[in-house]
Amino acid sequence: MLKSMTGYGRAGFTLDGEGYVVEVKTLNHRYLDLKARLPERFFPLESRVREEVKRRFSRGHVTIQVRPSQGAGAAFSLNMPLVRAYLEAADRLRDELGIDGAVDVPFLLRIKEVLGAGEEGDSERDWRVFSEGLGRALDEVDAWRRREGGDLAVHIGAGIKRLDALMKEIERLAPESFEAHRKRLSDELARLVGENVDETRLIQEAALLAQKAAVDEEIARYRSHLNQFSRYMDSDEPVGKRLDFLCQEILREANTIASKSPDVRIVQAVVEIKSELEKLREQVQNIE
């Protein structure tokens, strides 16, 4: 089943009485590109977050943001032993050096060790709680990507049918076009023979030109690529890059057919194939 690279998921979790929200957004990208915005408490977990995302997704731009729940205030803890030590040191300075002035409380609060953001926490315990919330958000993203992938599969399937129908038209026209081309060569050969041009050389040139006008091999390769495309559509593996490559190969064969054929009807069919492939590639480039 195809999966889109576009998705969104959201989940909440509570740790030490504080609520947090995990938001995950994904967009199409050639490779896996992760940006994680975490509160300071969860910095030690970032490598594990990356591992979990890599386990889930193979491609896409992934943004993970964790923030306190709306309305939740930041939890702070005072390091009272350290505060007392600073105050005692200030008293000694005043007594021993005769320095006047009171202790500036805002200055004390700016000292990182005095005012901490909540509990320092235990990384293993934090990860157990955090990963449960992250997992639910990633599950939502995965479900979203599957739904979008299903919608894309419908449109891509219609495009494949159109490419198949256009090739059937080329297959119908090709023998007629080839025969008309052969007859023109034969008539030209007869005219040149009447002008005493070397007959053996003319026959060789005519055979070479006729061979160049044949498109059987290109049609066979086009069909092979189209069949491979349909098989990948049913795969459970990430196939976006493969589908994009096959679009390029199908285009290559179609262009060769157009360059070989003097039949304007075949050329027009190839123009329509190229238009269909352009739409198909836009859709395929959002497939994981």
Image (tube, rainbow, N blue to C red):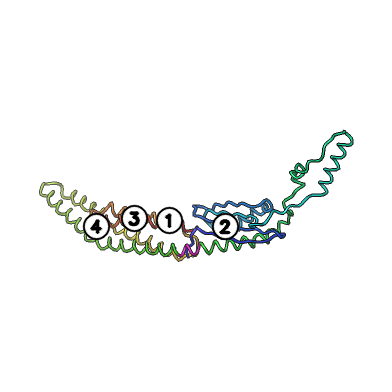
Give the residue type that dot 1 points to.
Answer: Asp
Q: Which of marks 3 and 2 is in front?
A: 2
Residues at badges 2 and 1 in contact (C-beta under 8 Å)? no
Instruction: Answer with mark 3 or mark 4, whichever residue precedes in sequence.
Output: 4
What is the distance, in whole Å, between disc 4 and disc 1 at their CAs? Answer: 27 Å
Residue extending farthest left = 194
Q: Which of marks 3 and 1 is in front?
A: 3
Q: Where is residue 278 in the image (x, y as percent from the top left)?
A: 37, 54
Q: Is mark 2 on a helix, strand or loop?
A: strand
Give the residue type that dot 3 points to.
Answer: Ser
Q: How crowded is mark 3: few (under 14 residues within 10 Å), some or many (20 or more)?
A: few
In the rendered image, the vertical position of residue 78 relative to residue 179, given as above or below: above
- Quarter location, residue 172: bottom left
Q: Position of residue 109 (x, y in %)?
A: 75, 45
Q: Which of marks 3 and 4 is in front?
A: 3
The residue that label 1 is drawn on is: 244
What is the distance, in whole Å, between disc 3 and disc 1 at their CAs? Answer: 15 Å
Residue at x 71%, y 56% (from the top left corner) = 123
